[in-house]
Amino acid sequence: MKFGVIGLGRMGNAIAARAAAGGHTVFGFDLSEQAREQVKKEGVTPIATLAQLAESADIIWIMVPAGEIVDRTIESLKPHLTKKHLLIDGGNSKFTDSQRRARELEQDGIAFLDCGTSGGVHGREHGFCLMVGGTKDAYDRVAQLFDAIAAPGGHALVGPSGAGHYVKMVHNGIEYGLLQAYAEGFALIKSGTFKKDDLDLAQISELWNHGSVIRSFILELAHNIFAHDQQFDSVSGEIAESGMGLWTVEDADRNQIAVPVIKRALDVRAWSRTTGGDDATKIVALLRQQFGGHAIKTLKD
């Protein structure tokens, strides 16, 4: 397939690289010349303008920050698009925005898929999990492309337009709760009844990943952290967020569905940004860096 990627940051670069490795002809656009040069190493052809990208590629993946910039990107592309084109928004857009964009593009005869993308910095090597919303015809058209980008068995059409980003939104809400639970448990082990160096967080996190019912990828990442540092003295406990956790809680409230664990995890994140947090929020911040490459604030800052 002739595939174009708009936005060549960590995730966009990795998606383009996996598509190229899968045998597709891949073009990349980014406002940053450095990002365009970097993608050459992945077998991707850099493109200088959106017009040239639309001329070169039939399938265009938008990987830019959620919100107005997605709309601006689509509006800039529209004059250069024809009915042969299919747009994919692979960022963390709000699902209602994706529903609107699908309706607007349909009026111009342009197919659109919303794709919740999970896998973080590890997706480059192991493949991503792609949660796709849209029509079956559009999905089937690019299934081979998704095969290259995703982990084995890691893509599916989960529902109509908006459903891909809706499922990713709930995925992130669950992530908030899981991270908080792991972090609180390890903070208790660190500073509870057995204090100081009585218990080894690295040993325990490694042990739990062999046969325990709470073994997981997140626990593997926790072990990576604890193998290097169990004090976290130089790390701020402030936790940033993308907004998807808030959208999850808002949708739950709108539908009168209780999500107390996710809501509490969201509240803790807000609390951490006003107080500097505690050991548990430091662990959450470090885990976010491990799986997503998210920046953490150090106390020296």
Image: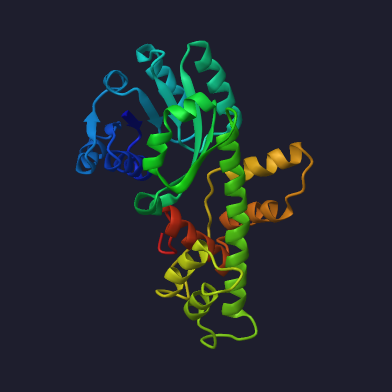
Using the rendered view, name the quadrant where residue 13 is placed: top left
Q: Residue furthest bottom?
A: 198
Quadrant the C terminus occupies:
bottom left
For the point 55% across and 36% down, the residue is 164
Query: Up-down: is 260 above or below 33?
Result: below
Give how far across and how far down residue 212 sits, in percent.
58, 73
203, 289: nearer the viewer? 203
Tell me how the rendering is colored.
Answer: rainbow
The reply to whether residue 294 is in sight is no
Using the rendered view, name the quadrant where residue 163 is placed: top right
Query: Up-down: is 138 above or below 232?
Result: above
Image position of 242 (left or right of 265): left
Q: Which residue lies furthest to the right in this view?
A: 256
Using the rendered view, name the quadrant where residue 226 is placed: bottom left
211, 179: nearer the viewer? 211
Query: Up-down: is 20 above or below 120?
Result: above
The reply to whether residue 86 is in sight is yes
Give how far across and how far down residue 213 sits, in percent.
61, 70
For the point 73% across and 50% down, the residue is 259
Give how far across and how far down residue 54 sits, in percent.
32, 20
Give how far across and how far down residue 189 sits, in percent.
59, 78
| Circle count | 0
240, 141: nearer the viewer? 141
